[in-house]
Amino acid sequence: MIPWAEIGTAIAQTTKLSFVLRDVRSQGGGCINDTYRITDGNRTFFVKLNQPSKLAMFEAEAQSLEALGHTQVCRAPRPITWGVTETHSFLVLEWLNLTRSGDWAHFGQVLAALHRVTGERFGWHRDNTIGATPQINTWCDRWSFFWQENRLGYQLRLSQRRGFRCRVPESEVLAAVPRYFATGDPQPSLVHGDLWSGNVGFYLGAPVVFDPALYYGDREVDIAMSELFGGFPTEFYRAYQSAYPLSPGYQQRKVLYNAYHILNHFNLFGGSYAEQAQEMLQKIAIGP
């Protein structure tokens, strides 16, 4: 049974306003969490639920959303409260009545502005998740090493446990990574980290991002993933390029970056992602 009374109490304690639940509606579309729209008749919230062991995942998501909000350039749902009960962990967010259509050109400009928020190193102050998979964000001074160890190498190690065997030696794949950055490291930009169309919506026509896997990395990881599952409208890419042109060699690096997500999909869902991962890893090993 879902502990709505405890969640309502947490909302009331955080907002300093009474919350007596009047209506609950399940929201579809999530494959990681159970999601709901709840209201007391005056205020409405979006709630994510999972097992009690997933509290750290919700804590990291809340901190990611707060970090996006603090940039003042990118709208994200505001986290209200989070916690754990005997049966569930929960995350409560502000309710935004999102649509799938809006000003994609403006979103290109917004993402370019987000990517101009930079740090001194690659990573983040804590690990988070990519889907349900742990995402390692240990600080690193070199981007190529960060991608070797915390991204591609980590997913390869997970995939081995699921029976994946790379057709080319994994050592060759990882050894090829520095060749993609022979001209130097990119700037550590604040990136969404899981930027596909399912994690973008529009509120009153303005872009909103959610479900982040936030860290400081090469901004191209967001652009690469945006192209992975169908892509965004052309006006998004045109506006982004106008505001913050991509560096030469992006098309080669795109495969390197998206292999991380395809391996993660294999680790989460198995199936046809194995063959797609094999093809991408072979291209990476050949090098730019």
Image: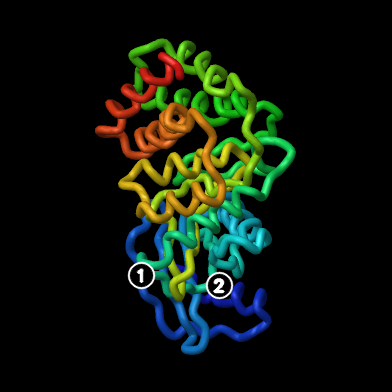
Report the quarter where the N terminus lies. bottom left
Q: In whole angstroms, how far apart are the C-alphas of marks 1 and 2?
A: 18 Å
- Camera-side residue: 281 or 85? 281
Residue 53 visible (yes or no): no
Q: Residues within 10 Å of mark 1 (few under 14, many from 20)?
A: few
Mark 2, residue position? 6
Mark 1, residue position? 26
Left or right: residue 277 versus residue 75 is left
Q: Residue furthest front?
A: 242
Report the quarter where the C terminus lies. top left
Q: Position of residue 107 (x, y in %)?
A: 48, 59
Q: Position of residue 133 (x, y in %)?
A: 47, 40
Up the image or down, 49 lies above or below 56; here it is below
Residue 267 visible (yes or no): yes
User: At 40% from the left edge and 60% from the top edge, which residue is drawn?
Assistant: 34
Mark 1 or 2, closer to the camera? 1
User: At 41% from the left edge and 35% from the top edge, which residue is drawn?
Assistant: 264
Q: Position of residue 183 (x, y in %)?
A: 61, 22
Up the image or down, 14 lies above or below 172; here it is below
| Snapshot quadrant of residue 164 | top left
Left or right: residue 151 versus residue 16 is left
User: At 47% from the left edge and 89% from the top edge, which residue is drawn?
Assistant: 41
SS of the residue under disc 1: strand
Dot 2 amino acid type: Glu
Up the image or down, 102 lies above or below 280; here it is below
